[in-house]
Image (cartoon, rainbow, N blue to C red):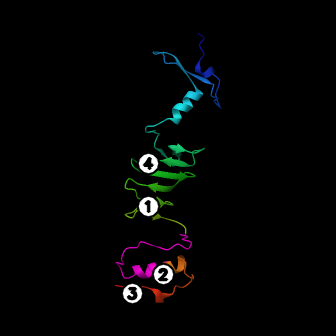
């Protein structure tokens, strides 16, 4: 059997199904596997796939380059980054920070930009607990949620508790 040193092997840049990869363990039996077998094995992964945690400068899961991807800075936290900047953070409690917003006690924290609600309204708001809650909801519904825009018609505000 001929011996070839690893540095002298040809570089495989595009594997074909019929390419054969030799697995040589000094203390064990030498084996071979085809690229088709490797692809089949990868497509049938049915267990946890573990990758390195990464960082915003080199995400654990990257898409084509190291500028964008997903990483886990600490256990239980997941971050989506683009251009090496954190864009979305989901912490261990399921709280979400978007646009670099620090995660607070609320479930969702957002920084930057305007919320374009189109003609959607705020719904499922609990009973008003503060004097200005109902007034604020009515204002937003009127201006952003299908009202005429501009200054709201304050005569339609619900009575405050």
SS assignment at label 1: loop
Q: Which callout, 4 or 2, points at the residue further toward the start of the chain?
A: 4
Q: Secondary structure at mark 4?
A: loop
Q: Which residue is mark 4?
A: 73
Q: Which marked residue is nearer to the observer: mark 2 or mark 1?
A: 2
- Helix, strand or loop for disc 2: helix
Span highlighted in magenta in the image: 114-140
Determine the CA span between mark 4 and mark 1. Answer: 14 Å
Separation of disc 3 and disc 4 at Cα? 48 Å
Q: Tell whether label 1 touches label 4 (CB within 8 Å).
A: no
Give the mark toward the camera: 4 or 2: 2
Mark 3 and mark 2 lie on one chain; the one further toward the N terminus is 2
Is the C-beta separation of discs 3 and 2 under 8 Å?
no
Residue at 51% in and 16% down: 30
- Disc on res. 139: 2
- Label 3, secondary structure: give it: loop
The residue that label 3 is drawn on is 159
Instruction: Determine crowd level at label 4: few under 14, some 14-19, many 20+ residues with C-alpha closer than 10 A.
Output: some
The answer to if 112 sits in the magenta stretch is no
- Residue 141 in picture, x, y percent from top left: 49, 78
């Amino acid at each position: 059997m001929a011996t070839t040193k690893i540095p002298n092997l040809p570089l495989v840049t595009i594997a074909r199904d019929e390419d054969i990869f030799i697995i040589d363990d000094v203390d064990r039996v030498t084996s071979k596997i085809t690229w088709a077998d490797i692809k089949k094995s990868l497509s049938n992964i049915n267990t946890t796939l573990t990758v390195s945690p990464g960082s915003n400068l080199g995400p654990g899961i990257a898409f084509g380059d190291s500028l964008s991807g997903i990483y886990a800075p600490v256990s239980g936290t997941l971050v989506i980054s683009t251009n090496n900047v954190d864009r979305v953070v989901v912490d261990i409690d399921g709280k979400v920070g978007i646009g670099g917003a620090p995660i607070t006690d609320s479930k969702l924290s957002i920084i930057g930009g305007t919320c374009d609600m189109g003609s959607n309204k705020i719904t499922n708001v609990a009973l008003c607990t503060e004097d200005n809650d109902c007034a604020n909801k009515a204002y937003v519904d009127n201006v952003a949620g299908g009202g005429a825009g501009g200054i709201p018609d304050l005569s339609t505000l619900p009575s405050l508790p």
